[in-house]
Amino acid sequence: MADLVPLLKAEHLTMRFGGVVANDDITFTLEEMELRCLIGPNGAGKSTFFKTLTGQLVPTSGAIAFRGQPIAGKLSYEIARMGIGIKTQVPNVFNGLSVRENIWLAVRRKATPRAQGPAVDAVLQMIRLTDHADRIVATLSHGQRQWVEIGVVLAAEPELILLDEPAAGMTDEETLHTAAIIREINQTRAIIVVEHDMEFIKQIAKKVTVFHQGRVLVEDTVDKVLADQRVRDVYLGKKVAA
Amino acid sequence: MTIRFRLVAQAVAVLIAIIAIVLIPSVIELFAMMQLTLFAAMAVLALSLAFIWGFGGILSFGQTAFFGLGGYAYAISAINFQDSTPSILLAIIIPSLFAAILGYFIFFGRISDVYLGVITLTVTLILFNCVNSTSGDEYRIGKALLGGFNGIPAVPTFNVPFYPDQILSPEQSWWVTGGTLLGTFLLLRLLLSLPAGRVIVAVRENEVRASLLGYDPRKVKLLTFVLSGAIAGLAGALYVNWGAFVGPTIFSLSLSAEIIIWITVGGLGTLLGPIVGCVLIEYIVAYIGSQQALNSNLVLGAVLVVFVLLLPKGLVPTARDLLMRLVPAPKPKAQLADEQLTPSVAASHMAGAE
């Protein structure tokens, strides 16, 4: 029975801001352990969708269920406690605190005091910031702060991880490392990634959902989506053709 | 090793502070000691705002509301019970309850920071006007006449706990007030080094991130607000003990503004700075008052402008930065990081390093 309930199920989700419809009747299902990429041009409603999933916005209508539990309209901290973690588009970190403290604040919600130290060290190693652990986050480069936020999200050990443009502002080498980390955490948890970088998508993606003007345009494997003429028209044209 | 050095340095500093508090009555004159007692009571009030503003990130203009409530709660119950033991407790409990109710509506109603300032300011004004208009025999609580704008004179001062006959001497009052200041300072330092304190700072740093990690910012801010109200209430009791009098001017707006100046001068985001700022400013105000040559409000305004323009970080953080530049740092990397800090970041860094 248990595996019949999808990890995440959004049904007829609509989010309106006055006259603007940011999400229009979206139905979206994610299975346990799945890795899904969300793509779409700017303004397609990807970040709005993430915000409704994490309680930062209350959807105008529609339902969201996380493991069968309704979450639409719940507060951010309640949803976070249920096991959804998010890296937001604009880095949301504790700028005035050290890297170590940022990670620790995420770890301590779940780990016992004795397990906290090793858990923090493991995350620091994974995001390769062990040498910068005692630096104040505000003094780090944009790419490194992206890493801090990814580390904070991983450290909280959520069941579902949402990553909004994780590779933005990173060098090619850093992007490769991000892709490696995403594949690694996907061994144990489900992930949804929003990304514009098609090379990055190709490295990690299995199934891709394309958003366009607030609606789901296509949902298929990465190869089929990239070959789809409608997708090329609305978004990819230049990059894939090149 | 640096951690051990820091701990030893802190222990030595605390020891010096204890010795100073103990020895002051035998070193200085009675008048100066009374003045120091007042400054210490005010410094506890400064700590209450230093905590909520510098570490909770909440600029409350209403600290004098809790200060005044604490003062009145102490005065009214001391007159009724003729014993300061329960009165001091009430001076903490009543402002805390008031802060809990007010804070519940502010934080759970998701009122933004600007309106929080407006609301706390307005509440202070309302309390001032209410208490100010209670002259007449009909306004009494038990044996205590509220007295309207004349206030409540001849409030019994502190006695030895549970021995109402043994009133504290001015020396003993100083020890209690100075000791309370040191104790409040140490308790806040301890709290800020514990996980609960780190969460308070985290919510100040980034409320969205804190809630996305599963912390409830409303609850954290409410607890910060209540604790800060409790400290301000305790300061009110200390203040009334000093003067044996409480009047509605305890709720005055000029005092609200003065606390903000103490903290700006001493250094926002530190606990030591506001104490230094408070004592320094209060000393200057008292000195000017005795000279009659200058208007103290004018001087206060000038001091604030000078500090905001020239020393925006405040005295204590600036002194610490200078000291760090003079002493060769053992870790060059750490020093590099420190030098790149913006003022606000440096202030928060103090949370762990002060």
Image: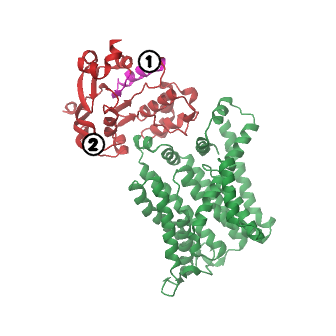
Chain colours: A red, B green
- Callouts 1 and 2 in the same chain: yes
Query: B107 or A102, which is in the foreground?
Result: B107
User: Which residue of the protein is positioned furthest toward the bottom in this rendering?
Assistant: B137
Secondary element at tag 1: helix
Question: Looking at the image, is mark 1 or mark 2 nearer the viewer?
Answer: 2
Label drawn at residue A176: 1
In the rendered view, would you say B240 is above or below A213?
A: below
Residue A193 counted in the magenta span = yes
Q: Which residue is mark 2?
A: A19
Residue B47, x across and y down, in percent: 60, 57
The label on residue B349 is: none
Query: Which stretch did the figure color magenta?
Result: A173-196
Residue B198, percent from left and from top: 52, 45
Residue found at x 50% / y 26%: A143
- Pointer 1 or 2: first along the chain: 2
Q: Chain of mark 2?
A: A
Residue at 43% x, 49% y: name it: B217
Can residue A1 be seen at all in this image of the molecule? yes
Query: What's the amino acid at mark 2?
Result: Gly
Most distant residue in the front direction: A19
Task: Residue B231: name its quadrant.
Answer: bottom right
Residue A141, relative to residue B203: is it above or below? above
Residue found 30% across the figure and 26% down from its top: A33
- Residue B328 magenta: no
| Residue A159 seen from this side | no
Which image quadrant: the C terminus of chain B?
top right
Mark 2 Cα-neighbour bin, 10 Å: few <14, some 14–19, many ≥20: few
